[in-house]
Amino acid sequence: MIAVDLPIATQLAREALAEYGMDPATDLTLLKQRENFVFSLSDGGTDYVLRVHRQGYHTDDELGCELDFVRALHGEGVAVPNFVTARDGRGFCVVGRDHAAGPHQVDLQHLIPNHGNFGDERTAVDGSADLDAADFAELGRLAAEVHRATEQSGYTMAVPRDDWDLEGLVGAEPAWGDPLRIDELRGEDREAVVAAIERIREVLGAYGTPAHRFGPIHADLTPENVLRTRDGLVLIDFDDFAAGWHLFDLATALYFFTPHPRYTEYRDALFAGYEAVRPLDEADHDVFPAILLARGLTYLGWAADRRGEPTAEWHATTVLPNIVRLSRELIA
């Protein structure tokens, strides 16, 4: 196998087009390159988005489980992508078996006309993001609709994935890596984070995992994964979907805004929107700071395994003081 760059990803995408009954010579436009290569295309007057998935990120069964979840939400009327079925009836295809890059999963979905996303992580952290509190209220409602629809549809995790549970967040081997491996985390700052991790384990252990608090979640509700459309917000990119606390989705939506001067206003609006659809109780509000910090620690663990990459360096340097601040507040 060889490293996948844009030309190789394009070759794989063209091979996949045939699996959806489309001309492999169809024009492809790169929309995004992060964990996956994402292309836009048109066929027969319909616009689509095609994703070439990062190799080995999920097994075929895990990806099938993810797309089943999105289809279940779509069937309940939640604003999520609409996937196209491949010729063999699956929600994705596997191409590249005869390619030097090796087999890759590819899915196809209808393009969602939009005028940008909810924002971005960097302007959230540096405080320059200029969002209306009403945006967060709408986002809260969307998150609540996901959780409510999951319960109403009776959806269950058919295939195990790396859960966002206590061990996945702050266990001996966190799902996204150990945040304490960040070299810049030293001295009293490190001691504060270590103490906060113990506090998180205590608080979340007592909070528990009953069905009204814990279940299938999106798990990556960052600004980039929320599109603005004429009909309202749409939630995309379920790559990290797994079982976790419902509040984890709210924590993900807010985490990068915690240094923002309007954070309290945004937080209150997000919760108000959520509770207009799906009420929370006092225990949910009490445990939220621990889940918020746990979410931040996952990004630090992710960065520890990717030093040298621009986003990893940003987390390990620019965002790190925010983790220390949240840790000190939690153990105060």
Image (tube, grey):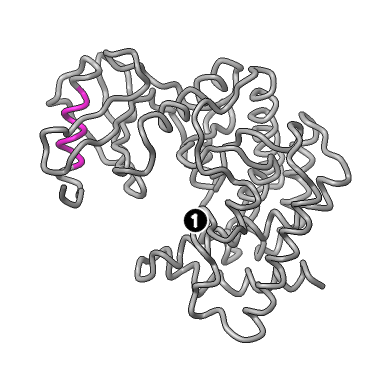
When the figure is inspected, residue 39 is found, relative to residue 267, above or below; the finding is above
Residue at the (21%, 14%) spot, across then down? 21
In the image, 28 versus 82, the foreground residue is 82
Query: Which residue is denoted by mark 1 in the rendering?
Result: 176
State the image coordinates of residue 42 (x, y, percent, origin top left): 26, 23
- Indicate the quadrant where residue 43 lies: top left
Magenta-span inclusion, residue 53? no
Q: Which residue is nearer to you in this view: 210 or 313?
A: 210
- The magenta segment is 9-17
Residue at screen point 20% across, 41% down:
9
Question: Is residue 119 shown left or right of residue 332?
Answer: left
In the picture as drawn, the residue positioned furthest to the right comes out as 282
Residue ranking furthest to the front: 172
Q: Position of residue 197 (x, y in %)?
A: 68, 65
Q: Relative to 229, is 155 on the left or the right?
A: right
Magenta span contains residue 12: yes
State the residue at coordinates (65%, 35%).
Answer: 143
Q: Secondary structure at mark 1?
A: loop
Q: Tell me where residue 120 appears, x and y as whole percent.
A: 51, 53
Which residue is at 63% across, 41% downward?
244
Question: Is 294 located above or below residue 163 in the figure?
Answer: below
